[in-house]
Amino acid sequence: MVPHLITALTGPINELEARVLDSMPAIERWFRLEWMEHTPPFYTSVDLRNAGFKLAPVDTNLFPGGFNNLTPEMLPLAVQAAMAAIEKICPEAKNLLLVPGAQVHNTFYLSNLQQLVRVFTQAGLNVRLGTLDESIKAPRPVALPDGSELVLEPLLRSRGRLGLKDFDPCTILLNNNLSAGVPRALQHLHEQYLLPPLHAGWSVRRKSRHCQSYEEVAKKFAKLLGMDPWLIHPITGPGGEVDLASGAGLDALQGHVDALLAKVRRKYKEYGINEKPFAVVKADSGTHGFAPLIVRDAKDLADPARRGRNHGQGEAATGPLALIVQEGVPTYERVNDAVAEPVVYMIDRYVVGGFYRIHAERGIDENLEAPGASYVPLAFAESHHLPRRGDKPGVSAPNRFYMYGVIGRLAMLAASYELEATDPDAEVYD
Amino acid sequence: MVPHLITALTGPINELEARVLDSMPAIERWFRLEWMEHTPPFYTSVDLRNAGFKLAPVDTNLFPGGFNNLTPEMLPLAVQAAMAAIEKICPEAKNLLLVPGAQVHNTFYLSNLQQLVRVFTQAGLNVRLGTLDESIKAPRPVALPDGSELVLEPLLRSRGRLGLKDFDPCTILLNNNLSAGVPRALQHLHEQYLLPPLHAGWSVRRKSRHCQSYEEVAKKFAKLLGMDPWLIHPITGPGGEVDLASGAGLDALQGHVDALLAKVRRKYKEYGINEKPFAVVKADSGTHGFAPLIVRDAKDLADPARRGRNHGQGEAATGPLALIVQEGVPTYERVNDAVAEPVVYMIDRYVVGGFYRIHAERGIDENLEAPGASYVPLAFAESHHLPRRGDKPGVSAPNRFYMYGVIGRLAMLAASYELEATDPDAEVYD
């Protein structure tokens, strides 16, 4: 059962919601026209932050986990979207090789894999799992929480193709974000469809590039709706190259943060928002052991103790690191007093579901995607597909979810622009 | 709530169900390849009859009503399928003109229209209703059971286009089966998409042509699964031209019925079915006031009293009528002791839901699509999209519904073949 999202439905985001609802046919048509020109990523999840006065995507994941958090009611939509995606990419497909991430010791992640296997099997493919873990030399069954099991198999690489023993797939689907770089097994596969493409890998993507694309998308969309793009877009700028150990580049970073906070303050003033803005400093590429840093005042950056609060997962950063500075978007959605941020899931161009990521022990300005005992995924209660036009803004869960689906798709479209711009195999016409 | 379909899950159709489940990826791939070559009808509903020993489509409707009988859980699938359909046909579409059937005094039909308006609005179109009823000269609101209303507007025909006042649609969707022929307002519309095409009209289609296409499809499919096509195909043959008033052609019809019943008896013997086969005599085109006639013995046709039991809806047949003779498929599904037949709904190539048509007062060999106080639509309890491979045949509702969805899609594919073959604008390469 899903508790009622009282506060999620009473925030001051209602004007945006009303505008999005009123413009629904125009919005859907706009997306249709965009998808005529651009190819959606194969699958995408987008983290949103709803500040009440604005709603913005803060993370666009092209190798989404967490499909296990979608409800059984959402699953048919995922299957249907997967059918549409396969039909477009490779209608003659028989076999799909799914390459999982490294988190296969995490039962939540295993449930995610199980869900993906289910979706693509039911879309009509033979699905098997091939692991990049070279220590696995023979098929290895892994137990699932529900008592069933998945089998991880060693990859077999031939000259031009990747497969498994007695399994030659036409399509390889990565659920591994390639944060450690592109392994050899995946390089130079020109005979098979590799989805997402290698340049979508976490170690290759630049957040600055994505944000640039998102800004472009947000401006187009805002023009369509006759509104200020800032309402759906977090201001983002460069942070320069910083060596956290030596402090080189910190002065410049402070300047970047100051400039960004000044812009945000102007916007807050324009909208009469009586809050203190904050910025988030992130590594431009991957994480490099650098967890996003919340900065309320550029001076804080001079204090190593405050910087020291930053302890990323994985190895620590060494040497100069390219950073970006982004307007922080607080999240004012609550489920039972816990801070919640919506996450939207898409397959091909279709929103297939979503949930709230809830973290009782985190603040409204903190990153909720972190380990924590109180992390609770909460599936959206009703379908984003069934907005109720005419309902008062802010009182209808489907209308709220529809709006989330729209903003999620904007971020997905930005990822599409981004992947086109960064495609190493793209033909360039000068 | 949906009662549990005990008997629907314990019939002897289980072997077919197991075979369909086992072949799921091959079946989905086969459909994908078929849809590369053929265009699915815009929307379709298919009536099935489950005899336990065979499962066959008995009516393929290209102007489906009854969308109101789909559950709210099924609606998102319909919206997503509608989005896919629009994107393919006319991505730049803004306005959709929906042309209803003549049954607008029936509240069930109005609820169907309301559901269609909802689906296509939520897929991102401005939807308005334009009526073929020439007595309607100004927008006429009609009340819906839920207290809301729909507005029927008079059509405005210009030289090349059809629309409403201040409403110029790029696509016209007919929910009117054109059983009275093609009205002038719909003729020669070459600038707009008219869906389904005029040659899908009920007065133009020939059941014999559809059955021929279905036979072709069923044979292909049966070959894929290595099974006898008869298990999913009702034997069908010509009935000749008969003048019911004068009796001319009756002898020949008796001969056709005899021949068909002999074929069915051989099949029954082959499969050890200890039942008396029956035939159904139908008008080849439309109904012409000729309701399907159940014939257990060709001699019955000589008896005007028995023939006289036939009283179709609408005007009675006059003059010679082209008839077809089809193997009768009894329906052995029951919901609370009432005879039930499954109806599958599709938009574009996607199954979006289904329900049982239940008629407590009708027999297992009778046509259930008839007025009756005990007519109850009963939505499928779970999604056809989520079959559970590994479950024992006959115990899983999703598996049963998946099988229905497959057979429904076979009939839809046959309609696609049929429409291609009968397209008056088709280019012919000799």
Image (cartoon, coloured by chain):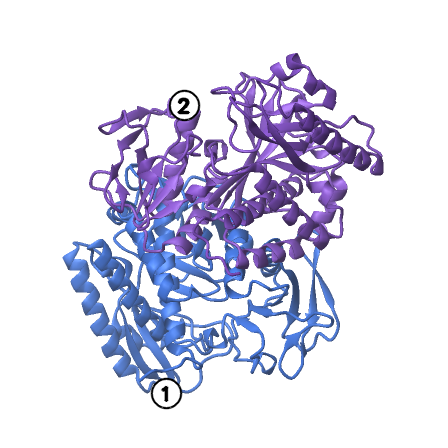
Chain colours: A purple, B blue
| Number of the label disc, if any, that sits on residue B246 | 1
Q: Are dots 1 and 2 on a single chain?
A: no
The residue at the point 27 percent across, 24 percent down is: A135
The residue beneath circle 2 is A107
Label 1 packing within 10 angstroms: few (<14), some (14-19), many (20+):
few
x, y percentage for residue A409? 58, 46
Camera-nearest residue between A380 and A311: A311
| Number of the label disc, if any, that sits on residue A216 | none
* Three-letter code, disc 2: Thr
The residue at the point 26 percent across, 67 percent down is: B235
Distance in Å between CA atoms under marks 1 and 2: 77 Å
Relative horizontal placement of residue B51, taking residue A203 as reference (left or right): left
| Residue B3 higher or lower than A337, as above or below | below
x, y percentage for residue B272? 16, 54
| Residue B230 higher or lower than B202, as above or below | above
**Dividing the picture into quarters, in which one does residue B262 lie?**
bottom left
* Three-letter code, disc 1: Ser
Q: What chain is tagged by disc 2?
A: A
Q: Is residue B1 visible?
A: no
Q: What chain is tagged by disc 1?
A: B
Camera-nearest residue between A95 and A282: A282
x, y percentage for residue A27? 65, 53
